[in-house]
Image (cartoon, rainbow, N blue to C red):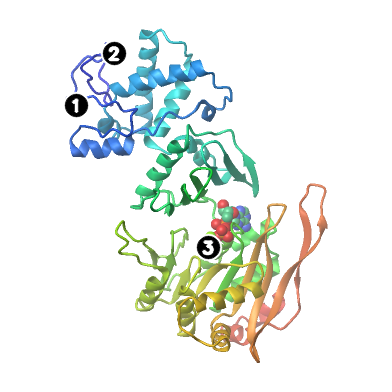
Amino acid sequence: MVMFGRRSTGDAASTAVSQPATVQPAVPANDASKPAAASSANKAAEDRLKPVSLPSDSDAGSNKVSAEASTTKDKIYTLLMEQIDLSTASRLPREDLKRQIIDIIGEIVMEQKLLLNQVEQQQLANQIVDDMLGLGPLEPLLQDESITDIMVNGASQVYVERKGKLTLTDIKFRDNQHVMSIAQRIVTAVGRRVDESSPICDARLMDGSRVNVIAPPLAIRGCSISIRKFSKKKITLDIMAAQGNISENVCKVLKIAGAVRLNIIISGGTGSGKTTLLNALSQLIDHGERIVTIEDAAELQLQQPHVVPLETRPANLEGEGEINMRDLVKNALRMRPDRIILGEVRGPEAMDMLQAMNTGHDGSMGTLHANTPREALTRLENMVGMAGINLPSKAVRTQITSAVNLIVQISRMRDGVRRITHVTELVGMEGDVIVTQDLFHFEFQGEDDKGRLIGEFKSTGLRPHFIHTAAYFGLDKALLEAM
Ligand SMILES: Nc1ncnc2c1ncn2[C@@H]1O[C@H](COP(=O)(O)OP(=O)(O)O)[C@@H](O)[C@H]1O
Ligand SMILES: [Mg+2]
């Protein structure tokens, strides 16, 4: 029987290698620090595939790792790696590779008279394949659709979020190096790097999930990986209304606000659902429009046919080649966009965003981090200040007022449910102060017996400032009805 993924080792650790496969020097594959003495093409494949280290037992669900069992596994692992031709294995479909690995494990167990039952052999094969082709101990979490966020805090603490609630898992990495290797694998796939000299990195998984890595020495307890999983389930405004994130009327007003091309800022804390809401709002954009999206790590999922997604680029090893949000917003203005959408406004690009909003790119949107609509305005002002153009604050506020029409505040409340707490309009200036008016706010009333918060999305009953714009689009009546 010839195994495709197998290499001929010369010192036949196994008698089952019936045919000398492509001759390759045996590499002690468990020693990840030693470079493989193979051809460069093979080396690349091997580097990509090199299992980072054997995951600990707890990934398989059992918490008790007897030292003996783990040495048995280490031994099998070492012998197995001697027999696998990593460059060939890289081309095998996962299931084929797994089947071959199970076979080889079976042989090793027999030859070496090791104690490992069928189930344990299967588990070991799974772990090895996960480590070779995927993200090691994180694989089962990535497969689990009920998990929305994965948070790795060093080697021995992995939290997940399900339905807005955090829980600790029993997943463990072998050591910090194991975590680092997985982090490295994630970021190199998108052409970035993470190490002691550049310990912070944003990246994205192939499926669109967003990843942040922060490594020691900045992360004191070991490499931390935060994954915001790409949600296959599209959350639309209607779904949000059905889930109680917003009321029917808030839903209607937001739809109208999008349709009449208001410039909208979504404000909220981390994980409050800003990006999700931005996605939901942008789903309503007409398919005839040209949209340019600008993000640090692309996570918007616009369905329109005419979208140009742009992503920033960090500096290279020599500190050169950085393209930041500002550069991209400036460039976007030269691309004849109908709307510009900024994933997250964090810095001086706020200035360019306001300029875009003020120069005929109505219907532009962005998110920023703030806890109230007022705070969002202050934040915006501060970020404009970062652009280094010394404008008096009144001038900045005037510019904000004429650029931004609506602030939508979203919050992840203590019951894990995201709710829009404010829909706030900017109506003008009074002296030095920006005047706003709330159209809706969420009024907290109590808690039901299941711990879910009770409250009401209250309309303030005010006449929306954008009623004239709505009238221009023939939506004024609908707007007043929803208030
Ligand atoms: N309305 C919602 N209903 C259910 N899950 C949501 C909702 N909004 C956001 N989420 C989930 O919460 C997580 C954080 O959402 P995201 O929009 O990325 O937050 P932010 O951009 O504010 O950091 C995601 O996993 C997302 O799927
Ligand atoms: Mg976001």
Pointer 1: what residue?
Answer: 24
- Amino acid beneath label 3: Asn
Question: What's the residue at 37%, 61% (across, down)?
Answer: 314
Q: Secondary structure at mark 1?
A: loop
Q: Farthest bottom residue?
A: 431
Residue 435's spot in the image, x, y percent? 67, 84
Label located before the other in sequence (1 or 2): 2
Q: Are marks 2 and 3 in contact (CB under 8 Å)?
A: no
Q: Is residue 426 visible to the viewer in this orientation of the structure?
A: yes
Question: What's the residue at 47%, 77% (across, down)?
Answer: 353
Cα–Cα gap, marks 2 and 3: 55 Å
Pointer 2: what residue?
Answer: 14
Q: Residues within 10 Å of mark 1 (few under 14, many from 20)?
A: some
Quadrant in which the C terminus appears: bottom right
Residue 45's spot in the image, x, y percent? 27, 37
Q: Secondary structure at mark 2?
A: loop
Asked if the residue at label 1 sits under 8 Å from ligand 1, the reply is: no
Question: Which of label 1 and label 3 is nearer to you?
Answer: 1
**Quarter of the image holding residue 319?**
bottom left
Asked if the residue at label 3 sits under 8 Å from ligand 1, the reply is: yes
Pointer 3: what residue?
Answer: 279
- Amino acid beneath label 2: Ser
Work out whether 176 lies above or below 120: below
Residue 342's spot in the image, x, y percent? 47, 69
Q: Are marks 1 and 2 in contact (CB under 8 Å)?
A: no
Q: Residues within 10 Å of mark 3 (few under 14, many from 20)?
A: many
Work out whether 466 lies above or below 290: below
**Quarter of the image holding residue 429?**
bottom right
Cα–Cα gap, marks 1 and 2: 16 Å
Residue 102's spot in the image, x, y percent? 39, 20
Work out whether 435 lies above or below 69: below
- Amino acid beneath label 1: Gln
